[in-house]
């Protein structure tokens, strides 16, 4: 779970997910990893306090590197801990923890499972970017993924390690898109499971600060460049 300037909801979200893990997996060793991406508000203070109080919480504070970088570092931390399964979500309180069960039920059928925001409560700029990326992926890679960048995904740890080994360098703006494409192309059934997406009640959306066209153009260039490498990377993942 990456977090940036979420002081108004971070306590609620952390308590929700750590409690969920204890209830869902009472006999297993689970932890919620929160990557604080250089928050400028009181998010760090609150997370450090929670870290001292909650036994199944792991907090990592880092310099601001952007949402994608925080996601990648969260995956790396999960792999460092030897996680059998890795689930990624966001800290903005827009998802419902009970929807996890929809993905968990499919874990024996695929090593990489995605949710899909069937009704998405986000600003128009974000909806446009999602549609743009969906069309780009379909045109460039010949594959259709409903919500390739969704922060609600379940990945088997060993498979995640294979994907991370093939992640482009330098690190792309939206690494979750590349992981989804590689997973789909390597033969995994992503399922695109409909999940609940709530209105954002607190905080601000950082993507709005970016120029819309710059985001789209950068993502398009990265995806187009990656097309030249994809076949070799898929072969390595399958091997």
Image (cartoon, rainbow, N blue to C red):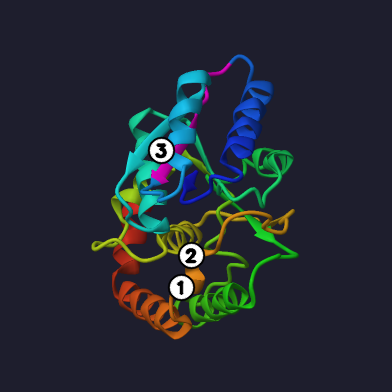
- Tell me the residue that label 3 is attached to: 158
* Residue shown at the point (51%, 73%) measured from the top left: 208
Q: Nearer the viewer, mark 1 or mark 3?
A: 1
Q: Nearer the viewer, mark 3 or mark 2?
A: 2
> Residue 71 location, x and y as percent?
42, 50
Characterize the local packing of mark 3: few (<14), some (14-19) or many (20 or more) Cα atoms within 10 angstroms: some
Residue 227 position by quadrant: bottom left
**Secondary structure under the numbered disc 3 in the rendered image:** helix
Disc on res. 137: none
* Residue shown at the point (53%, 48%) measured from the top left: 6
Query: Which residues lie in the magenta part?
Result: 28-36
Does residue 33 appear left or right of residue 15 in this picture?
Answer: left
Is 6 rendered above or below residue 67?
above
- Tell me the residue that label 1 is attached to: 209
* Residue shown at the point (33%, 53%) measured from the top left: 64
Is mark 3 in CB contact (under 8 Å) with mark 2? no
> Residue 221 location, x and y as percent?
34, 80
Examine the structure image and report whether residue 35 is included in the region drawn in magenta: yes
Disc on res. 206: 2
The residue most toward the top is 27
Characterize the local packing of mark 2: few (<14), some (14-19) or many (20 or more) Cα atoms within 10 angstroms: few
Foreground residue among 41 and 171: 41
Sequence-earlier tag: 3 or 2: 3
**Secondary structure under the numbered disc 1 in the rendered image:** helix
> Residue 235 location, x and y as percent?
33, 58
């Amino acid at each position: 779970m990456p977090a940036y300037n979420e002081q108004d909801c971070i306590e609620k979200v952390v308590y929700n997910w750590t409690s969920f893990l204890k209830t869902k997996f009472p006999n297993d060793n689970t932890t919620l990893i929160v990557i604080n991406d250089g928050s400028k508000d009181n998010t760090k203070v609150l997370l450090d306090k929670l870290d001292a109080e909650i036994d199944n919480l792991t907090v990592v504070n880092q310099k601001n590197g952007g949402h994608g970088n925080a996601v990648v570092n969260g995956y790396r931390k999960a792999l460092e801990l030897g996680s059998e399964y890795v689930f990624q979500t966001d800290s903005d309180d827009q998802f419902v923890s009970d929807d996890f069960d929809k993905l968990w039920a499919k874990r024996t059928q695929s090593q990489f499972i995605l949710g899909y925001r069937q009704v998405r409560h986000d600003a128009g700029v974000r909806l446009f970017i999602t549609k743009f990326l969906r069309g780009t992926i379909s045109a460039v890679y010949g594959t259709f993924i409903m919500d390739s960048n969704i922060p609600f995904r379940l990945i088997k740890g060993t498979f995640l390690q294979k994907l991370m080994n093939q992640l482009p360098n330098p690190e792309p703006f939206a690494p979750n898109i590349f992981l989804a494409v590689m997973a789909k192309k390597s033969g995994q059934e992503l399922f695109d499971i409909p999940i609940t997406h709530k209105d954002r009640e607190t905080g601000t959306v950082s993507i709005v600060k970016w120029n819309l066209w710059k985001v789209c153009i950068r993502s398009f260039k990265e995806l187009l460049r990656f097309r030249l490498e994809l076949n070799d990377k898929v072969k390595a993942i399958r091997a």
